[in-house]
Image (spheres, rainbow, N blue to C red):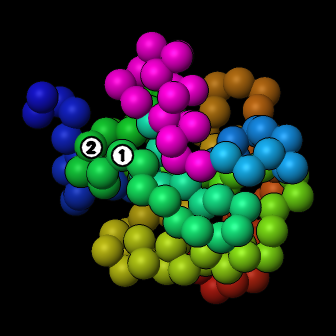
């Protein structure tokens, strides 16, 4: 069980994801949890989910290693925006607030998009996270 715990002093990345679901599909943490169970995982892989209306839902507790960024799970926290390409203004407001909170708790972390560390051809979360963070002064 201890292997499943994150040492908060070792968190280096805050990883932004998208659910890669149709932008009209309004799902949440429960649906993602069920989907990830079907993958054979221990449940939802992300630490936070941001729904289409901007609500921030809990996924895995922050002290539990995620299942969202292969090879980086023990040193990162993951947040997932529901949708694929057209995220709502409310989602971006909530994402900014969440990342500000996490940066206060984990000041040495870097905010990155999943595409930066993915070993696939995914473009998740389908926007330039670095550029967005710079514009929002989150870097």
Magenta region includes residue 30: yes
| 32 lies above or below 94 | above
Kindly identify the residue that appears in the image at 67 percent across and 46 percent down. Answer: 27
| 73 lies above or below 9 | above
Question: Residue 31, how many percent across, how many down?
Answer: 57, 37
Question: Residue 92, how many percent across, how many down?
Answer: 71, 73
Characterize the magenta stretch by its predominant secondary structure.
Answer: helix
Question: Residue 36, how many percent across, how many down?
Answer: 51, 26
Considering the numbered disc 1 on the image, is that residue within a helix, a strand or a loop?
loop
Considering the numbered disc 2 on the image, is that residue within a helix, a strand or a loop?
loop
Residue receiving disc 1: 60
The boundaries of the magenta stretch are 28-43
* Viewport quadrant of the C terminus: bottom right
Taking 57 as reference, is 104 left or right? left
Kindly identify the residue that appears in the image at 85 percent across and 49 percent down. Answer: 23
Q: Residues within 10 Å of mark 1 (few under 14, many from 20)?
A: many
Magenta region includes residue 111: no
As drawn, the residue found furthest toward the bottom would be 137
Q: Is any part of residue 84 visible from this angle?
A: no
Residue 51: numbered disc: none
Q: Is any part of residue 93 visible from this angle?
A: yes
Quadrant of the rendered image containing residue 131 = bottom right
User: Looking at the image, which is closer to me, 75 or 16?
Assistant: 16
Q: Residues within 10 Å of mark 2 (few under 14, many from 20)?
A: some
Taking 92 as reference, is 109 left or right? left
Taking 117 as reference, is 76 left or right? left
| 82 lies above or below 57 | above
Residue receiving disc 2: 64
Quadrant of the rendered image containing residue 58 = bottom left
| Count of all numbered marks drawn on residues in the image | 2
Question: Residue 4, how many percent across, how many down?
Answer: 22, 33
Q: Are marks 2 and 1 in contact (CB under 8 Å)?
A: yes
């Amino acid at each position: 069980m201890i292997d499943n715990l994150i040492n908060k002093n070792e968190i280096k990345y805050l990883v932004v994801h998208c659910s890669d679901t149709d932008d009209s599909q309004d799902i949440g943490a429960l649906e993602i949890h069920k989907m990830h169970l079907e993958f054979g995982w221990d449940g939802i892989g992300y630490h936070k989910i941001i729904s289409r209306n901007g609500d921030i839902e809990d996924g895995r507790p922050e002290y539990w290693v995620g299942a969202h960024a292969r090879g980086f799970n023990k040193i990162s926290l993951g947040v997932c925006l529901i949708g694929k390409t057209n995220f709502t203004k409310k989602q971006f407001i909530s994402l900014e607030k969440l990342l500000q909170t996490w940066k206060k708790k984990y000041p040495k972390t870097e905010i990155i998009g999943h595409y930066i560390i993915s070993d696939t051809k995914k473009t998740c979360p389908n926007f330039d996270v670095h550029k967005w963070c710079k514009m929002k002064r989150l870097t």
